[in-house]
Amino acid sequence: MAPTSKAEKKAAADAAAWMFNVVTSVGVIIVNKALMATYGFSFATTLTGLHFVTTTLMTLVLRIMGYVQPSHLPLPELLKFVLFANFSIVGMNVSLMWNSVGFYQIAKLSMIPVSCLLEVVFDKIRYSRHTKLSICVVLLGVGVCTVTDVSVNTKGFIAAFIAVWSTSLQQYYVHFLQRKYSLSSFNLLGHTAPAQAASLLLIGPILDYWLTSQRVDKYDYNTTSLMFIILSCTIAVGTNLSQFICIGRFTAVSFQVLGHMKTILVLIMGFFFFGKEGLNLQVVLGMIIAVVGMIWYGNASSKPGGKERRSHSLPTSKTETRYHDQRG
């Protein structure tokens, strides 16, 4: 009875983590779309920097209140993480500017096989045939409903390549650091958010000016646009935290596969909030295929042998032993 109860509690916690991530991610995308499309605030990198400022404040408050225990993350590990994360953010923004929407979506889809490769090489993960096929079905479904015009150019391909690999490495590294140093999601976010906030606020205005030819300090701020910026930053705290929670509980691959549910929800929400022209038979068919693939993946990867680690153990450190008890 006890094991079943424990399994049920874990399943409920897993579902809550996914729901938290889906709701906050879709929410921040919708708010940002309204902020940029309606109010002309096109400074995406600077806005992301503000997101991490808000996240930093949240972790500081929780630490003062005693909800986050002291922890240690070596400086070289922190610098590598921030490098991957910032290249991911900048790469995605530049890729969206230099590529067609279709190729941008293909680049995003390619993060799943890249994440699989990282797990196979570094974690010695082995996927069953059904798990591999379910991933292919998800890729097919999301591709059908998002990929339209596809055109490729050299600089756009380079930007997409950097974005895909840096994003995949950043998400892999979230899981790696939490396991190696026994860090909770709050602990890891407390280490990384201040560094990302500082670096993105430094390079954000410069990058945004290069991409848009507009200066963030010259933007015509008003009460409504400021409210949207504050709302975006508030929701983004949940997005950043839930990403770390989900990748920590699962893996980067599972986060990518099931995370495409957000893509589908964004399409549906866009249909309701921004017009009906984007929803057609092809999009609906792609959504159905993707959802079937996600359900299949969840079922296949959870079965014995669906996704398992071959004889391989993560290198441990004194830090890991020292902070193991704090994580519980």
Image (cartoon, rainbow, N blue to C red):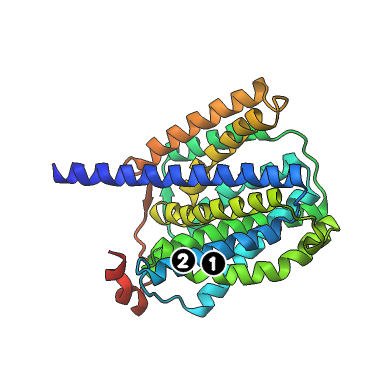
> Seen from this angle, which residue lies furthest left?
1
Position of residue 105 in the picture relative to residue 261 (left or right): right
Instruction: Tell me the quarter of the image containing the N terminus.
Output: top left
Residue corresponding to mark 2: 59
Q: Nearer the viewer, mark 2 or mark 1?
A: 2
Query: In the rendered image of this protein, does residue 311 appear above or below residue 267?
Result: below
| Three-letter code for the amino acid on which mark 2 is drawn | Thr
Q: Position of residue 60 (x, y in %)?
A: 46, 70
Instruction: Tell me the quarter of the image containing the C terminus.
Output: bottom left
**Marks 2,1: beta carbons within 8 A:** yes
- Tag 2, which secondary structure? helix
Q: Position of residue 50 (x, y in %)?
A: 63, 62
Position of residue 274 in the picture relative to residue 308 (left or right): right
Position of residue 129 in the picture relative to residue 99 (left or right): left
- Mark 1 residue crowding within 10 angstroms, few (<14) / some (14–19) / many (20+): many
Residue at 64% of width from left, 59% of height from top? 48
Residue corresponding to mark 1: 193
Q: Position of residue 55 (x, y in %)?
A: 53, 62
Query: In the rendered image of this protein, does residue 86 appear above or below residue 225?
Result: below
